[in-house]
Amino acid sequence: MFTLTPLELEALYLSLLVSGWAVAGSLPLGVACAWLLARRDFPGKSVVDGLIHLPLVLPPVVVGYFLLVVLGRRGVVGGALYDWFGITLAFTWKGAAIASAVIAFPLMVRAIRLSLEGVDRGLEQAARTLGCGPVATFFTVTLPLVMPGILTGVILAFARSLSEFGATITFVSNIPGETRTLPIALYALTQVPGGDEAAMRLCVISVVVAFAALLAAEILSRRVQARLKG
Amino acid sequence: MLDLTISRRQGAFRVEVTLKAGAGVTALFGPSGSGKTSVINMVAGLARPDMGRIVVDGKVLFDAALGLDVAPERRRLGYVFQDGRLFPHLSVRANLSFGLNRLPAAERRIDFDAVIEVLGIGHLLDRRPALLSGGEKQRVAIGRALLANPHILLMDEPLAALDANRKAELLPFIAALSRRFTIPILYVSHSMDEVLALADTLVLMDQGKVAAAGPTEDILSRTDLRPLTGRWEAGSVIRATVEAHDEATGITRLAFAGGHLLMARNHLKPGTQVRLRIHASDIAIALDRPGRVSVRNILPATVTSVSACEGNMVDVVLDCGGTRLWAQISSHAQADLALVPGCSVHAMIKAVTVARGDLAEQRGSA
């Protein structure tokens, strides 16, 4: 019988918590960015596009270090957050969620943007002629039609968040019960003598979680597609 | 009631249109690329004119001089697109209610069940658009636009994507629509069959401009507009009333201003008013009344004009008891008969050439 040790449970819980918040928190911004890139032309669009995609090509450690500099207790933004609201991001699970969100953001935006570009603008026009304003049209027509893309984006981002290591360990370090997610716990185990068996167990857990996420995504995606096709 | 004067630069040419559309069906007819769709897109607010003014039912929707441009969702116009544009994620019922649900209850003039009944889509309500046939999709699209209780219904070649059978199946629905729900329809088409079956008023468009506008019969019977109405469509359109059917011989007798016409049996009730199209090439001309001849319709007429058209053919316009008939004969025959305006002649039309497809039931039928 495969029962989880308290340490494994804690790492698993943290991984799901961090990834869940990373995705949920960045989704509205992701949809907004995707919409902006798919539908609007504005000066500096390619710069914005490049910035959003940067985490995809940069070493995650660079992103983590950058986050530490900006959002750390003495960073420009992080300092203000602490002084005004008493919020600390560095070395907390919230910081880990932000690191994961930044790293996974390009994947999410890409998937949603592609899906948005595939939406027939004619359907939006039809909604307008039926008395539906632009905002209502977005929520009643556009959003349901890009649901498959949003789902893909969410799954990709969630998967990427689960596997996030570099930016996380740089920004929020390895704090048991706070920032020690599955990959970080696994790394820590490989650094101590005799941790091989425990490391292997964490590997198995990682594989199972990732696989379950993919399977759930596949089932959901089929349901959504079926809804659109009748 | 639609009243517009608009101008918009469109690729290589300028769409410049002034038109009024009142009760009944007004058809915008013209070749592809003549700017028909641009006009209704501007009426709907999906395209912006560079200059001009659009007024529907006394409400100004667009006025360039005043800087007024009412958003599409506030125009209260129904739009039936060529490609249907049903929302794929919604059931037929939800598609139909889409515009209706956004109306205050006091403005819901058109009854849901009545629309379902006229369009015959009651059995489709719980399906999704992907499972409908082309004709069913268009019927739902028409119902959806109608249920938004628009001040005017805009239809952009709603039958163009359908095959001939589906088209024939849907035409009566649209004809019934304008009759049943008193709502003006602006109908874009490049098919003469549809214009003949539906239009009360015809606006001919060419190169972004209105070439001619007026009652359908008048416009279609004008020889000078033939380049626009189409060489193979050449013919006259007359109004007639179904008088009687002779079951034994399979003949239907129609009465019109110039006398009677016999045609192959149709299934319209006696007393029904119809619009009939007689192709110019189906009318032969005789100086004397022929004696024993198979041609069933021999109508006394007077030549009002003779003009040459391409291919050694001559257009002869006849006046037959106040109805204008348009015949196309060879210039050889014209010379032989010495046909000039003022000649008394007999127009001969074979009963079999008055085809059912050229006959359309009219609104306000007895």
Image (tube, coloured by chain):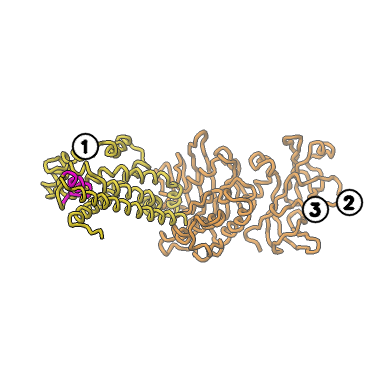
Chain colours: A yellow, B orange
Q: Is A185 inside the magenta-drawn segment?
A: yes
Which of the two discs, 2 and 3, labels the residue nearer the N terminus?
2
Q: Which residue is mark 2?
A: B291
Q: Is residue B141 visible?
A: yes
Q: Residue furthest right?
A: B292
Q: Which residue is mark 3?
A: B297
Q: Are marks 2 and 1 on the same chain?
A: no
Q: Amino acid at mark 1?
A: Val
**What is the crowding at mark 1: few (fewer than 14 residues within 10 Å), some, or many (at least 20)?**
some
Does dot 1 land on a helix, a strand or a loop?
helix
**What is the crowding at mark 3: few (fewer than 14 residues within 10 Å), some, or many (at least 20)?**
some
What type of secondary structure mainly makes up the magenta span?
Answer: helix
Q: Are marks 2 and 3 on the same chain?
A: yes
Which quarter of the rendering shows the C terminus of chain B? bottom right
- In the figure, is residue A206 to the left or right of A6? right
The chain under label 2 reads B
Q: Amino acid at mark 3?
A: Asn
Is the residue A168 above or below the residue B24 in the image? above
Q: Is residue A133 visible?
A: no
- In the figure, is residue A19 to the left or right of B110? left
Q: Amino acid at mark 2?
A: Gly
User: Which quarter of the picture shows residue A170?
Assistant: top left
Q: Are marks 2 and 1 in contact (CB under 8 Å)?
A: no
Q: Which residue is mark 1?
A: A62
The percent position of residue A121, horizontal first and vertical second, equals: 44, 46
The answer to which of B102 and A45 lies nearer the viewer is A45
Bounds of the magenta segment? A178-191
